Amino acid sequence: MEHQLTRPTATRKPFDPAYDPVHAANPGAGKDYAPTYWIATAGPQPEDDGPVTQDIDVDIAIIGSGYTGLSCAIHLAKEHGIKATVLEANGVAWGCSTRNGGQAQISAGRLKRSQWIERWGVDVAKKMHVEIAEAFDLFRDLIRSPEIDCDPQDGGHLYIAHRDKVLPALEKETRLLNEVFGYRARMIGRDEVHSDFVRDAEAKGAMYEPDGMGIHAAKLAFGYLRLARKLGAKVHTSSPVLGSELKGGVHHLRTPGGVVRARAVCIATAGYTSPGLHDVTRHRLMPILSNSIVTRPLTSGERQELNFRTHIPLTDTRTLRHYYRMLPDGRIQIGSRSAITGRDAINPKHLDRLLEGLYRKFPILRGIEVDYSWWGWVDVSHDMMPRVFRPDPKQQLFYAMGYGGNGVMYSAQAGRRMAQMVAGKGGELDLPIFTSPLPSHGLLTPFRRLGQWGMYRWYYLKDEIL
């Protein structure tokens, strides 16, 4: 297996494969990118504004330069005439935004529409669906910007049943989408999956959603960077926030190069949120590792035998789901669960487990060369739904995070919603994801990973054996 390295530079510090946001004081400063397919194939990285080198006064400071932070900066400028300053610990979009699978789906968080109804009732669930549908429209419109060339493959999403026993629940969810939400999802059988999409050996059927898109993760992030800076935002890299203090209503953010004094602060650090960053985000997320690999390009014979006729996102119905697709250059990308701790992430058993997932779906690929392998932290909230929230009405402090692995698309809307709140125009945002904080596990916080270990074993039994 070729373990690709990203464009190393003399000024970047080595990538740390064991980084763990539960324990690390901060993500470091000026570290190299994870060795992802996206970084290796994104082309020249756009210019940023370099590190903070002195004390500065700004109107709005955004912590984190991933999709959410850059979208917030874009929409502050486009819709409210506000030029923000973005602070990034390492390189632009160093965390989730360049380590994901590049799948945009019509969802946010990890709950299905039926679970929305169970939690909030039909009326709120319908409003949530409108919000997510509007978010996808925004995402499609945003990536049409000339600054953003992210290799989009639009055409829907296929939620593939990996066992016969999950088909009744999938059929029920499909009926619900149509009858309650007016969303034109449809069930398709195994034969149609194989003839019109891909010969996935596990597929017993699937739910097809009309909205879904594959994108190039790093090209999307770098496009956001170009657009944000064109609109007047400043993006300072190698500038981690090491501490913050509120003095006279002004936030003082301490970075290695100087203090950034800001009237308002937006936190957009997702799965890379350090416990010491701020009290309002401390232990409000459960960072979960996800592995991803990209194979060598398939031969024409392999493509023909697998009947790979689509580039849309594919997801299976496991609780610890696999997300996979064919990339524009003919490679297969697949990702799923990984280690529980950063220290264990490099253990080859996690790569082996992911490869076995690939082989179950596509047996003829057993032993195929893997050109890229990486892992990254997913920002899972304790109730499985994201938040865009102002925790204290007395402070100009906001956060947007908790996408649970479904942030590629919704992060654009979350950044826009956070910009609305900053501009004082968020009064009509009355959905639960806007009006309640990220929940905490409270006294159970020190035992979360023990619980995660047990749940992984239960999920395996439920998905594969019971």
Image (tube, helix red, strand yellow):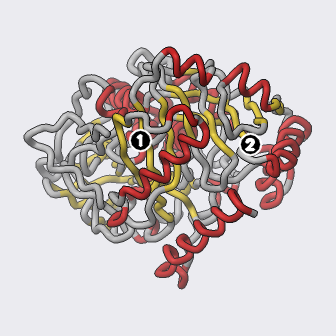
Residue 323 seen in this snapshot: yes
Q: Is residue 414 above or below residue 143?
A: below
Residue, disc 1: 97
As drawn, which residue projects farthest toward the right?
Answer: 179
Residue 396 location in percent, x, y? 44, 57
Left/right placement of residue 120 relative to residue 262 reads right
State which quadrant residue 65 falls in.
top left
Q: Is residue 316 above or below residue 348?
A: above
Residue placed most toward the observer, 101 or 236 = 101
At x 67%, y 26%, the residue is 156
Secondary structure beneath dot 1 equals helix
Left/right placement of residue 208 relative to residue 371 reads right
Residue placed most toward the observer, 458 or 77 = 458
Give the number of the mark in front: 1 or 2: 2
What whole-number distance in Å separates the C-alpha atoms at marks 1 and 2? 28 Å
Label 1 Cα crowd, 10 Å radius (few <14 / some 14-19 / many 20+): many
Q: Say whether disc 1 or disc 2 marks the residue closer to the N-terminus.
A: 1
Which amino acid, mark 1? Ser
Residue 104 location in percent, x, y? 57, 34
